[in-house]
Image: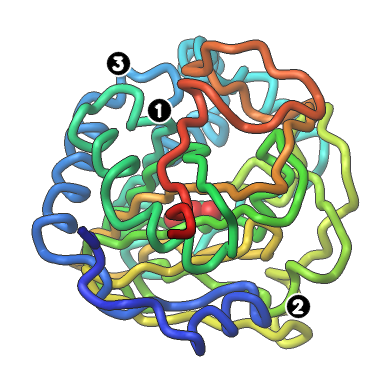
Amino acid sequence: MTKLTRAITPDEIASYNMAGVVLLKGVLDITAVNMVRKSIDTAINTLDKSQSGYDLSAITTAAEQGDDNSLIADSHGQHDIKAIMDHIEQSGNEFLYDQSPNAGEGRFLLDTAISSRLREFNRFVRRGAGPEIAAALLDSKKINFFGDQVFLKEPGTRERTAFHQDASYFEIEGDQCCVMWIPTDPVKLEHGAMIYVRGSHKDGHLYQPNVFISQTPLPDSKGDVLPDIEGHLDDYDLVHFDTEPGDVLVHHYKTVHGTGGNTSRYQVRRAASLRYCGDDIRIKRRPGTPKQLHHTNDLKDGMPLDGTDFPVVWRQAAAA
Ligand SMILES: O=C(O)CCC(=O)C(=O)O
């Protein structure tokens, strides 16, 4: 039985393929949205127990204040935060901030792999609408779940999310990978809506991953240098969408995207990001990418996605 409130249309599939992003209006029901919101809240309320959970606003504040003890205390899990902050300082890049009267009052929080910690969310990523959406867009015989992150920007969050391309953070290669951004609050530009460079999934570049709060690439990462999009917004074919709970924004994993801070006064912006892959995706190790501490298997170049780390969540029905 379908978990979608409606079918994905041929026009939506064409938009995904041509622009590298599509807004699927109202495809999730209220029960799914409420469960995702509750899961984000649970993850965020237990962020200190996650090895891959970060308060990026606390990190920018500590870096500005030269509070090395806090940066070192944060350097226990997925990232060496102190080394990354030193690397940003050496690069000469600034943190990317939005200006507003309340800038700095809110926090930018993120966590990775909450499906490995929260049973209901794990069920949703495997048995909810995500696999069906991926199957409709990726034209694949099977769909593997690849991973998840959650993002929260409180009102008054000054930190932008730097433009980046997910492909260079993911240790895979191929074409059939999509990312679903699932907002659980109404989102307009002022709350930190996702902004995409239309068609950038086809420009042939694999850009260095960056540190999100600055354009500085992650230490030791490889790839092309991403241009200064924030500094030249008019030069790019940018698109953003106002979204409501129930909507799902889906982008190709090579589509370049970023967001503003949340300069609104009262509205939090919570979203889950789910990643799914199709038949042609293979493992490709990349130096300098974020450690995926929840993975249980040793990954080798050329391996297809499989096993408990990348479960098959959808298969095409056999012909009768
Ligand atoms: O929500 C954000 O600030 C960034 C999300 C993002 O980059 C993603 O889901 O790929």
For the residue pair 129 and 154, the one nearer the viewer reads as 129
Structural crowding at the residue carrying mark 3, measured as other residues with C-alpha within 10 Å and reported as few (<14), some (14–19) or many (≥20) = few
* 190 sits left or right of 64 in the view: left
Circle number at residue 232: 2
Nearer the observer, 272 or 74? 272
Which amino acid lies under the numbered mark 1 shown in the image of this protein?
Gly
Q: CA distance from mark 2 to mark 3?
A: 39 Å
Name which residue type carries label 2.
His
Left or right position of 118 against 301: left
Marks 2 and 1 sit apart, C-alpha to C-alpha, by 31 Å
On the image, the x and y values in percent for residue 226 come to 82, 58
Give the residue pinned by disc 3.
49
Report x, y in % for residue 229. Answer: 74, 70
Residue 306 percent coordinates (x, y): 57, 27
Q: Disc 2 vs disc 1: which is toward the camera?
A: 1
- Residue contact at pointers 2 and 3, CB within 8 angstroms: no
